[in-house]
Amino acid sequence: MATKAKKPAAKQATSQTKVTRITARDTEKVAAKKAPAKAEKPSVVKEKKQSNKKNPIKSIAAPFVALGIYFKGAWYELQQVTWPNRKATWSLTAALLAFTLFFVVLILLLDALFKYLFELILG
C-alpha cells in the first residue's frame, strides 16, 4: 500500500498563523537621509505675536482631556491582552499558594531557631 507523505506538524501550524513584524526606526535619521543637503539661505520669516492670555476653557479642560486619553489608551492595551484560561488560572493560583505556604513555614522555622539561639546566648 502506498501512503502519502504528510507535512510536518510545525509547517502546518506556521502556515495557519500570521505574524506581523514591527520594526522601530529613528524618524529623524530617516528624514535626514532622504532630504538632500542644501546651502542654507537666511530666510526672513515674519513671526506672529502671541498673546500672553491663555484660553481659560482650554486650561480648565486640559486635565480632563488628558485623563480621557489615558483611559482610552489603557482600554486599548487591555483589549490586546491574552488572558489565561480557567485551567491555567487555577494552576497558577495553586503554585502561588504553595510558594506562600513554603515561605511561611521557612520564616516560622527561622524565627523559632533565632529565638532559641538568643535565649541560649542571653541565658
Image (cartoon, helix red, strand yellow):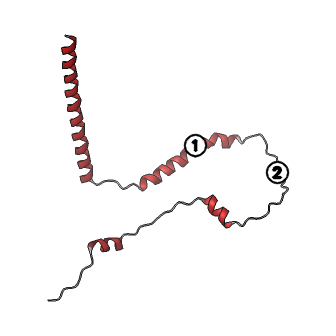
Note whether 23 is above or below 68 in the view shown: below
Q: Front-most of 45 and 54? A: 45
Q: Give residue 9's quadrant in the image.
A: bottom left
Residues at marks 1 and 2 touching, judged by CB atoms closer than 8 Å: no
Residue extending farthest left: 1
What is the crowding at mark 2: few (fewer than 14 residues within 10 Å), some, or many (at least 20)?
Answer: few
Mark 1 or mark 2: which is in front? 2
Q: Which residue is mark 2?
A: 47
Amino acid type at mark 1: Phe
Horizontal arrangement in the rendering, residue 72 relative to residue 55 (left or right): left
Residue in view at x 22 percent, y 44 percent? 94
Quick one: 87 or 67, which is closer to the camera?
A: 87
Counting residues from the start of the chain, the first of labels 1 and 2 encountered is 2
Q: Is residue 90 above or below residue 5?
A: above
Above/below status of 35 relative to 2: above
Q: Residue at x 65, y 63 (%)?
A: 31
Q: What is the C-alpha distance between the residues marked 1 and 2? A: 32 Å
Residue found 34% across the figure and 54% down from its top = 83
Amino acid type for the residue under numbered disc 2: Glu
Q: Residue furthest bottom?
A: 1
Provide residue 112's location: percent of width, then percent of height: 19, 23
Which residue is identified by label 1?
64
The image quadrant where one finds the N terminus is bottom left
Locate residue 16 relative to residue 66 in the image: left or right.
left
Q: Find residue 101 and report its horizontal and vertical position in percent.
A: 21, 36
The quarter of the picture where the C terminus appears is top left
Label ID, residue 77: none
**Helix, strand or loop under label 2:** loop
Question: Which residue is nearer to you in this view: 63 or 90?
Answer: 90
